[in-house]
Image (cartoon, rainbow, N blue to C red):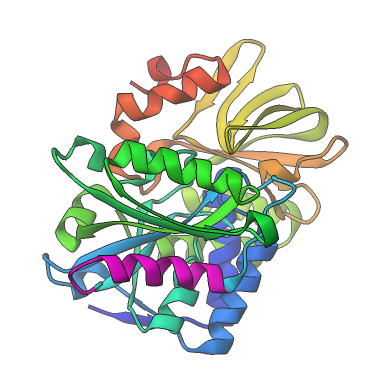
Amino acid sequence: MTSIKLDERMMESAVFGGAILGGGGGGWIEEGLQIGRLALELGSPELRTIDQFDDNDTFVTVSLVGAPGAKDKFLKPIHYARSLEMLARGLHKPISAIHTNENGAGTTVNGWLQSVMTGIPLVDFACNGRAHPTGTMGAMNLTEVEDYVSHQTAVGGKDDNYLEFSITGSLGKAASLIRKASIEAGGLVAVARNPVTAAYARNNGAPGAITQAIEVGEALLGAKGEAAIAAVAAKLGGQVAAAGEVTDFEIETVGGFDVGTVRIDGFEMTFWNEYMTLEKGGERYATFPDLMMTLDVKTAKPIVTAALKKGQQLAIIVVPREKLLLSSTMNNKKLLQPVEDIIKKPVLDYIF
């Protein structure tokens, strides 16, 4: 049973490592660094292991919901704390710990700021050890728990787009309405949601996900260029699948998500916030929840899908799902079916 006092180097490693594990989604590196630095300026966030909590302790997820590429998105640090404050007020029991929903550039450090602002402990845990597009994919299979009542709050936007939204109801309906709220707020909202016991979280989520992101980030930041890319692939047990120029790129925001395709070195990648498939010449090389990620060939900086541009020189790394810390949702056909509907390619046959 240990606690880690988080510092600047760990924060940077968490953001860059989270960007890798985001698989193309999970927010922006710059915003992750901004929130992480602010948390360290305001206090000394401490990361506790999950075995420091009793089985019946209450965990709450904090997350970002929306499309990172949305032009009118607006999110301030106070929005993160406000959404947690609203959720805490509606619960009739204390919150024992908070954690992020997924690893990602902006999401691995989500919770650090809320922890120093509220005093609620931060646990080394994520609902999913990689990023995923839908709220239900980050809900630790609560969709399968009969009569589970979801509590969710969302805050974001500015001026006429500003909103504070709270919903209690079925998980699917609550997640859908939170997604719609993100659209109304300009594209992105800070969310607090889905209280569960520590025991349930342990059995359905990804304990150790934050320290994994820190370790991946250390591998990335400990080298330069191609060596850094190779170090990340080796750390995760994956490989560098290709490297070359972005020759074609399409993106549109659909229903609060970034959806599109990119072609690099003859490979085609589809994405739905996160990369979903990697193909070349009709052959499938990787399928979500396998991890696919693009990095700048020269700088090794992770490039999220919302930051793709024609002419970029990018490397593609691929990590098999078996090497990742994944939620039980990543084995739920019902929750993965929408991927096929969005990208118009077969997915389930490759996963199951």
Q: For the stretch drawn in magenta, what is the main secondary structure? A: helix
Q: Can residue 25 be seen in this view?
A: no
Given residues 208 and 39, the one toward you in this image is 39
Residue 187 vertical position relative to residue 106 in the rendered view, above or below: above
Residues in magenta, as a range: 78-94
Query: Where is the C terminus found, in terms of image quarters?
Result: top left
Left or right: residue 294 versus residue 178 is right
Could you say where residue 114 lies in the image, as x and y percent from the top left?
A: 45, 75
Number of labelled discs? Answer: 0
Could you say where residue 246 lies in the image, as x and y percent from the top left?
A: 81, 33
Left or right: residue 226 versus residue 331 is right
Could you say where residue 91 lies in the image, as x and y percent from the top left?
A: 24, 66
Left or right: residue 14 versus residue 332 is right
Q: Which residue is drawn at 54% across and 54% down?
A: 104
Q: Does the magenta stretch include residue 86?
A: yes
Q: Residue furthest top?
A: 282
Q: Can residue 248 be seen in this view?
A: yes
Q: Residue at x 62, y 69 (%)?
A: 76
Given residues 286 and 167, the one toward you in this image is 167
Q: Residue at x 45, y 47 (%)?
A: 130
Given residues 13 and 59, the one toward you in this image is 59
Q: Residue furthest right?
A: 311
> Residue 194's quadrant in the figure?
bottom left
> Residue 4's quadrant in the figure?
bottom left
Q: Is residue 208 magenta?
A: no
Residue 211 vertical position relative to residue 267 in the rendered view, above or below: below
Q: Which residue is drawn at 43% across and 61% down?
A: 212
Residue 206 vertical position relative to residue 23 in the rendered view, above or below: below
Could you say where residue 1 lies in the image, as x and y percent from the top left?
A: 22, 78
